[in-house]
Image (spheres, helix red, strand yellow):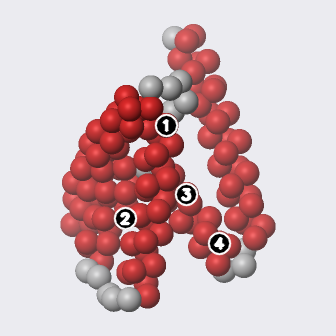
Amino acid sequence: MEKYLYVFVGGGFGSMMRYWLSGIVQRFAGSLFPYGTFSVNIIGCFLIGLFMSTFEERFLLNPGFRVFLTIGILGGFTTFSSFSYDTISLLRNAEYFHAIGNISLSLVCCLAATYFGLVFGKQL
């Protein structure tokens, strides 16, 4: 139950950071392209790679803090970081078929789900 609390608190904090940072970047960029979201995704992906490599290779970290930081904060900041880490893990383990499948299916299915959600939402 303790880990759920870590995810809950970290997720709230990460979501607030995403909202704040993506808004600042988007206002600065002043473009129709979603630079705010794009920036948050790139930063989140970099941070999960940095944190996980540090946690795996350099020192042991309290498992609760690892959950708070990676699943909680970075999960709230951007779920793209988890997708990227999972895909890189598959590639590192020479699971190329599964990595390509994860990339392809996630991209196609998530874009399709978003589209169909928008269509369905207009029908309500």
Q: Mark 4 or mark 1, which is nearer to you?
A: 1
Q: Which mark is residue 2?
A: none
Rendering coords of residue 8 (x, y %): 26, 53
Q: Are marks 2 and 4 in contact (CB under 8 Å)?
A: no
Q: Mark 3 or mark 1, which is nearer to you?
A: 1
Task: Write down the residue under mark 1.
Answer: 35
- The alpha-carbon separation of the residues under discs 3 and 1 comes to 19 Å
Specify the quadrant of the image occupied by residue 123: top right
Q: Secondary structure at mark 2?
A: helix
**Nearest the eye: 32 or 117:** 32
**Which class describes the residues within 10 Å of circle 3: few (<14), some (14-19), or many (20+)?**
some
Rendering coords of residue 121 (x, y %): 53, 17
Residue 17 appears in the rendering: yes
| Number of numbered callouts drawn | 4
**Which class describes the residues within 10 Å of circle 4: few (<14), some (14-19), or many (20+)?**
some
Q: Secondary structure at mark 3?
A: helix
Task: Write down the residue under mark 3.
Answer: 83
Task: Write down the residue under mark 4.
Answer: 90
Judge whether 78 appears above or below 86 on screen: above
**Which class describes the residues within 10 Å of circle 1: few (<14), some (14-19), or many (20+)?**
some
Name the N-terminal-most of marks 2 and 4. Answer: 2
Q: Secondary structure at mark 4?
A: helix
